[in-house]
Each structure stands twice: as C-alpha cells, then as structure tokens.
Amino acid sequence: MKIIDGKKIAESLRADIAKEVKGFTRPPGLAVILVGHDPASEVYVRNKTKACVEVGFYSDQLHKSANITQEELISEINRLNDHKTIDGILVQLPLPKHIDENAVIDAILPEKDVDGFSSENIGKLMQNKPFIRPCTPKGVITMLGSINYNLKGKHCVIVGASNIVGRPMAMELLNLDATVTICNSSTKDIKQKAKSADVIIAAAGVPHLVNADWVKEGAVIIDVGINRLDNGKLAGDVDFESVKSKVSAISPVPGGVGPMTIAILLENTVTAYKARI
Ligand code: NAD
C-alpha cells in the first residue's frame, strides 16, 4: 500500500515555484481579502500569506470589517483588478450572510481569479478548456499523477458535490477520460456505488464516513475531508485504519490534500502572473 504524501509533493512544488520566481522581472502579487473574524478563515489566510512570502511573492492581506457592504467589497475588488502588480485576488470564504458570494467572486477578473471559482473559469473547466483551475481538485489530480495513476476508463466515485470540491473534481476527472459518479447526502446505496470504484474521492465533511465496507480491494482513495473532532484532533472523511489493508494507495489526513491546496494556489498565481506579463 502506497501513502500519497501530499506534504512532500507540496514541498517539492513550492521549491520549484520559488526557483522559477527568482527568474521573473518582478514578484507575482497575491491579494487575500478576509472579511470578519472567523477563526478558521484567519488561520487559512495566515497560512496562505506565509506560503506566498516563502516562495518570494508579494503578498497583500486586506482585513475588512464584517459590516462591509457588498458594494464596498466589490469596489475594493475593482481597485485590485486595476492594480498593475497584483496578479491574483482571493476572497476567503465564507462571507457574511448579507453578501452574495457569487456576485463577489464574479467581480474578480477571470485572469486574476486564482481560486478558479468564477463562472468563467468553472465554465472553461467544464468545456475542457481549463485556464485557472480550483485549487483542491487540481491538487488531487497532481497527487494521482505523483503515483502515475492512469485515470482513463477508471470508475471514480466522488463523495460530496460542493462547488469548491466535488463538482470541479468531477470535471477534472472527466477531462482525463475517467467515468465519474458524484454522490451527495441524498444518494441511495452509496456504499455499493463506492464499492464499485477504482478511485474514491471523499469530500463530504463527515469524519470517518468511508470505511472498509465502502472499498473494493486495490482501490485508490484520496481523502479531502478536514474535520476537527471534539478532542481537538483533525480527522479525514476516511477511516484510515479500517481501509488501509484493502487499498493500493491512500492520502492521509493531515499531510494529504490540505498542503496541496496551498501549493496549487501558488501555482495558480504563477499562471495568472504569466498570463498578464
Ligand atoms: P460542503 O459542506 O460544502 O459540501 C459537502 C458535500 O458532501 C455536499 O454535497 C453534501 O451533500 C455531501 N455530503 C454530506 N454528507 C454526506 C454523506 N453522509 N454522504 C454523501 N454525501 C454527503 O463541504 P466542502 O466545502 O466541499 O468540504 C468537504 C470537506 O472537505 C470538509 O471536511 C472540508 O473541510 C474539506 N475541505 C478540504 C480542503 C483541503 O484543502 N483539503 C479544501 C476544501 C474542503
């Protein structure tokens, strides 16, 4: 059984990016906008900023009050859209309830939308003409590539259908000629569906949901879930101990998809920089 070590793959990606950036005429610039005081979001933004600085990017962190209006937030985005040395704009989600997240995301110029969540970038992925691709699903594809896994003709079951993970994940896999089943909380006979999978991508946000009963012998599992348990520990959506003797390869939590998401954000910022230079 192979462990797909996302931490190691991410470190190597970051080292390659840092090396490449040294040859650029100016550092790529990433602006991260945080609205309000959600503690988890504050940690994510801090980690993203730190990762930017480590690879030699220019990083601008904008912390806005939870009372900011949608118009004010969009006008801030417009300012960054026009900014010459800002290549990427990221708005940390979730936003306060009075703000329409889709309207805010679509205010970001597609060529600066380094999260890849805008209608234009999602549409391009859907049409198999990808430009900037959502970080977590792209990270999963990089992880499968690291074990030279050929997705062509393979049956992939995705557990979870969110806009940021499950849905773009399905398009990524389809674009590589896999056969894809997308499950959500209303899916019937989900275990049987998962049991027919060559690859399971677990992204439901339910700790230890996927156990040995869900998995066929030799399957590959990527665990996207990051769940904080009552004891303070992090758990994935997969019961690692239960499935480990059945799978041919699996990504752990922590140290799996999490570090990849940030590394791909840096990669996307380089893509955005190159598109503008
Ligand atoms: P979400 O809550 O937006 O969506 C969850 C999806 O899973 C929904 O489609 C829902 O219908 C489905 N679902 C919920 N319970 C289910 C069940 N019992 N069976 C089948 N489907 C079920 O969540 P999200 O934002 O996509 O995040 C999912 C998980 O991935 C969370 O644990 C989150 O923390 C994690 N995550 C990790 C990264 C990373 O970088 N590793 C990035 C994003 C999200």
Image (spheres, rainbow, N blue to C red):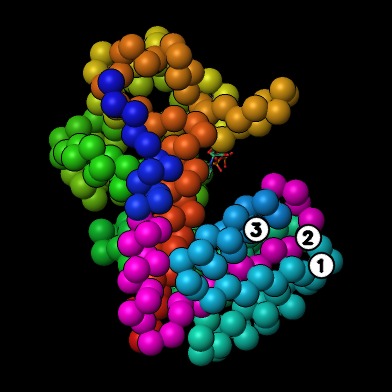
Q: Earlier in the sequence, mark 3 or mark 2?
A: 2
Kind of residue at badge 2? Gly
Tag of residue 46:
3
Dots 1, 2 in contact, CB < 8 A: yes
Say above or below: 274 vs 254.
below
Q: Which residues are magenta?
A: 13-40
Please name the residue shown 62% across and 74% down the image. 60
**Horizontal side of residue 248 vs 86, given as left or right:** left
Q: Residues within 10 Å of mark 2 (few under 14, many from 20)?
A: some
Please give the residue where the numbered disc 2 appears in the rendered image. Answer: 36
Q: For mark 1, what is the residue?
A: 65
23 in magenta = yes
> In the shown orientation, is residue 151 left or right of residue 4?
left
- Figure check: 185 above or below 22: above
Residue 96 in the image: state x and y as whole percent.
75, 57
Q: CA distance from mark 1 to mark 2?
A: 5 Å
Q: Is residue 150 magenta?
A: no
Q: Earlier in the sequence, mark 3 or mark 1?
A: 3
Q: Amino acid at mark 3?
A: Arg
Closer to viewer: mark 3 or mark 2 = 3
Circle 1 packing at 10 Å, graded few (<14), some (14-19), many (20+), is few
Question: Callout 1, which amino acid?
Answer: Ser
